[in-house]
Amino acid sequence: MNKGRVLITGAAGFLGSHLCDRFINEGFEVVGMDNLITGNLENIEHLFELKEFEFYNHDVSKFVHVSGELDYIVHFASPASPIDYLKIPIQTLKVGSLGTHNCLGLAKAKNARIIVASTSEVYGDPLVHPQTEDYYGNVNPIGPRGVYDEAKRFQEAMTMAYHTYHKLETRIVRIFNTYGPRMRLNDGRVLPAFIGQALRGEDLTVFGDGSQTRSFCYVDDLVEGIYRLLMSDYPYPVNIGNPDEITIKEFAEEIIKLTGTEQKVIYKPLPKDDPMQRQPNIDRAREILGWEPKVSRAEGLKITYDYFRSLPDEKLYKKEHNDFKDYIKK
Ligand code: NAD
Ligand code: UDP
């Protein structure tokens, strides 16, 4: 049964690849698009043999053409780890702004419904806790995270403008820290960083004193929330994340226990503008989508650890910088 044709940008990335799987399993034809700047074709190689799947290696910040009809666009292309967007700040600004504009233009031309991947980073270092969708945020536009945060805020503004001015069917999902298989082991995000360190027999690097908090959502829960939002008729931003909040120090201790490593926690300087607390208020998702996360951190971490453990040594030892000071120009 063909439910329609969907374009997924960022298809070779962590979340994009899981979204490709979900839409294929739901009975859609999927057009994946990615320029592979932080993604990896290995994440979607199992889809290439399917007639329902096609792939374009293309930078969405340049004019996007897809022939044929499109019913939905799922715009997820963007670097997402703080280290990645420090390394490629201009591409990050471009994909959130120009890339989003191109996707909105394509949605308008095809009369397709579009969902854009926004982020809890639109709340910056939040002064309201937990974060509700009505909170406008506390973002430093010229700090190291500004390239990502402001691109995503612009993305939301542009998406709402297409909704109000062009009457386009739009959806905005504000994603909170999500984890699971297919994350890049060395992308610098805290979960792969800690598990990678444990697997290599290195100490776990906690930034600052580890009292900052995050709330981690397992990828399957997130994908379910995104799917429900896209199929809903709600055009305003919706937080999707797991409200189970934990300090980074406690999180390191959980990883030490899970992996059985004999290593310890060591402390490194806190990067500039690192948010001190983050927890989604998901009342809106509960009410409008009937959604809430189902996978506990213990279950999700076990699956993710098993995935990282199964990777070949060359991935485990592939060096990518995990140190912010390497990327901040003096
Ligand atoms: P990821 O880096 O694994 O995936 C992003 C993908 O987009 C990569 O495959 C990359 O090659 C591709 N891409 C980047 N720029 C592109 C461009 N100009 N043209 C085409 N493709 C491009 O990151 P992810 O964690 O899967 O994040 C996906 C989306 O979700 C991003 O928009 C991110 O901002 C958002 N998000 C993720 C999280 C999270 O916790 N994972 C949290 C909030 C928001
Ligand atoms: N962090 C850490 N050690 C690491 C990597 C990250 O203590 O090796 C901290 C980081 O400073 C932040 C939290 O973990 O407070 C989450 O970082 P991540 O890069 O995963 O994403 P963020 O939520 O900050 O965008």
Image: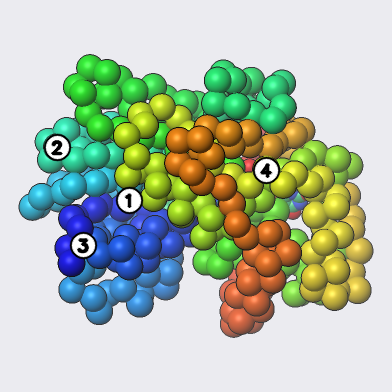
Residue farthest left in this picture: 68
Q: CA distance from mark 4 to mark 1?
A: 27 Å
Image check: 171 left or right of 200?
Answer: left
Q: Between disc 1 and disc 2, whose residue precedes? A: 1
Locate residue 106: give its quadrant: top left
Using the image, determine if residue 159 lies above or below residue 68: above
Q: Which residue is mark 2?
A: 111
Q: Which mark is residue 243?
A: 4
Q: Which of the two discs, 2 and 4, sits closer to the camera?
A: 4
- Asked if residue 262 can be seen in this view, the reply is yes
Count residues near mark 1 (Cα–Cα under 10 Å), then give few for <14, some for 14-19, many for 20+: many
The spot of residue 58 in percent (x, y) is 27, 53
Image check: 77 left or right of 278?
Answer: left
Three-letter code, disc 4: Pro
Q: Between disc 2 and disc 4, whose residue precedes? A: 2
The spot of residue 1 in percent (x, y) is 18, 67
